[in-house]
Image (spheres, coloured by chain):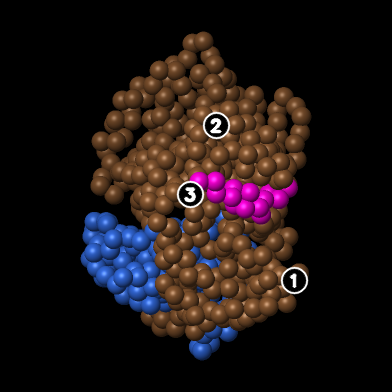
Amino acid sequence: MKLNEYSDFMQKIKCNDEFRERMKKMLSSESDITCENEEKISVVKPSRKNVWIRIAAAAASFLIVCTAAVSLKNHLPSVGTDPDNFSTGTTVETTAETVFITEQITESDDSETETDPDIREVFSGAFDGAYVLSSEGKGGAPMVGTFYYDSIHRSYTVSDAEGLVNDLSSLKWEKCSSDEYDAAVCTNKDKGEFVRHYEIDINSSESVWNSVSISENGYIYDYPYYYRLADENEIQNDLHMIFEKYFVQTEESKLAEKISEGKMSFSNLDAHYTYELKSSYADCSLSGKLSIDHDGRDLMYMTGEGIFDEKDVSMEMVVNGENDTVYRMIDNETGEPYLKFAYGYNSANLNLTRLGTQYYYICRDIENSLMMNVHSKVNNFLHIQLPADELCEYYWSCTTENGKVTENYHVALKDGVLVSYEKTDSSGCHVRFNLEKYTIDLDEFEFEKDVPALYDEILDQLTEYEGGRSDDEP
Amino acid sequence: MSENTALYAFEKYGDMVLRTAYVFAGNFHEAEDITQEIFLKLHSSPQDFQSDEHMKAWLIRASVNHCKNYRKSARISKTSHIDEALENTLSCEFSEKDNEIRERIEKLPEKYSLVIYLHYFEGYSIKEIASVLGKNENTVGSLLRRGRAKLKIELEKEGYAYET
């Protein structure tokens, strides 16, 4: 088949009329959706918390679902028992209890202040067992799997919703402007860094799209309204106590925290590692030395011998700090450099070939996979088997809503340090990483070569498209 | 730029984003989801585009990055060998071979699949691809050559006659 014939085929892929109409409604400033069942309004309490899509506070119409009975894929719970009971372009199915209301929401006046807002009303949709996702650092709450290296995400469940609502509403709150909220919660707008804030699921146990956000410095965001604690003194003593009392950390979050802390918990580490990646498009195996020094200048040095891209290679990697990685790979047959790059965890360099051996990034990936599953729990089942031993092993699998397993994980920690990791996914991709013969916190620790000089040497050898780090992605 | 950039962007480039998402995600339902997410994200966080071309480049990169995230996400569900949703949508016939070619392109390392897609399916020249991706033209040319060579090998393994 000629590529241009395939190209002709590809050009026929277009948005169908119903998808186009739906998108136009969502992106337009006005909607022409009318109420279908007005007599239900008096029975069903309309709540602005049932916003099914979060958009920036602006003059807009939006669809409010008064009961959780409308099925729009990946954003709301499904109707009935069949999660795939609609297909592209079909009309949205509703139950008798569903009411659609169109409402013109005006942007809140930034100069408006209101004392004694009804915080009980804000959190009225809270329920026992609701998911809470905390985020801090770059990027705020992760959007569809965008995790930054410097961001921290943890998950909890609400132990007692009624108690939570009572205690929060016993504090004094007042309305504030979006500008004040942004300034208080986003600590560095240029870098997109946020203070810790908790997104609490409201009225739904399946998605964080219906949620209220509360920050550790006393700000609430409940679209399109913002509130702050009137008395800053209540933040430390009262607000944080409420978080501790009612947010119970999940098991997967505890594991993520262990892995995150474990990778920095030692003064030095010396180990032999093995790494394997097998998939339909790659067959790679490397083994070598891993040395980490956290005293003085944070450095990691790795060597590797093995097969990569069907070549017999030798590799050296230096990590300066945690998120500044350089490596070079030599083709042993020719003696010539084969690959060399400088990159960070979120580098957008499209030429980049990442190596799966970077120890900190492995820890980070595992941590994020635990949080990813929580964030999109509506489609996943997460099971963790906890052992009790000197060597702690964890197993879990991720499944789709149909129960099909998509990924299996096995992780082992010793004294909190990741020593083994294995993952298989439904495409047949299999990754394995092991630390062997490792020692931690040696009194006499030295790298086998001048690692800072090696870092500079590799950096100097990089060309324009092999170098640079960028965490900026659209 | 139009007052409602996201709506304008969708009307102008919605089909392109859908195609790009389909090429890299491999599933029509997910391609629609990705398309929806990209434009809603643009709606909630408007970008300052200097031109339509700037907007198009941003959308292409956003599509590819969203597809990368989808691949990493455990949310990825079934991938049917024949995409029934796509069959229902298209007026043309959709064969097993067409899907295999798309899979071969998708399985190339991203640095190759992206330039292959932009050159052969969106009709960008090397110079334009370099501008979209912010790369050196020689780099793009090199990636195109190597990507083509890799694709040829993969297609010939499957018994296809590879012709450009």
Q: Nearer the viewer, residue A249 or A224?
A: A224
Which structural element holds mark 3?
Answer: loop
Q: Position of residue A107 (x, y in %)?
A: 42, 61
Task: Please give the name of the residue rendered at 57% of the width and 20% of the height, measured from the top-left corner.
Answer: A439
Q: Amino acid at mark 3?
A: Glu
Measured in 3D between alpha carbons, the distance from the residue under mark 2 to the one under mark 1, in whole angstroms, is 44 Å
| Residue B112 highlighted magenta (yes or no) | no
> Residue beneath label 1, please?
A80
> Residue beneath label 2, please?
A234
Query: Residue A4, can we see it?
Result: yes
Task: Please give the name of the residue rendered at 28% of the width and 41% of the height, measured from the top-left corner.
Answer: A462
User: Dot 2, crowdedness within 10 Å: few (<14), some or many (≥20)?
Assistant: some
Please check whether the numbered discs 1 and 3 fall on a single chain.
yes
> Residue beneath label 3, please?
A114
Q: Which residues are magenta?
A: A114-130
Please check whether the numbered discs 2 and 3 fall on a single chain.
yes
Q: Amino acid at mark 2?
A: Glu
- Say whether disc 2 or disc 1 marks the residue closer to the N-terminus: 1
Q: Amino acid at mark 1?
A: Gly
Q: Nearer the viewer, residue A340 or A49?
A: A49
Provide the letter of the chain coloured brown. A
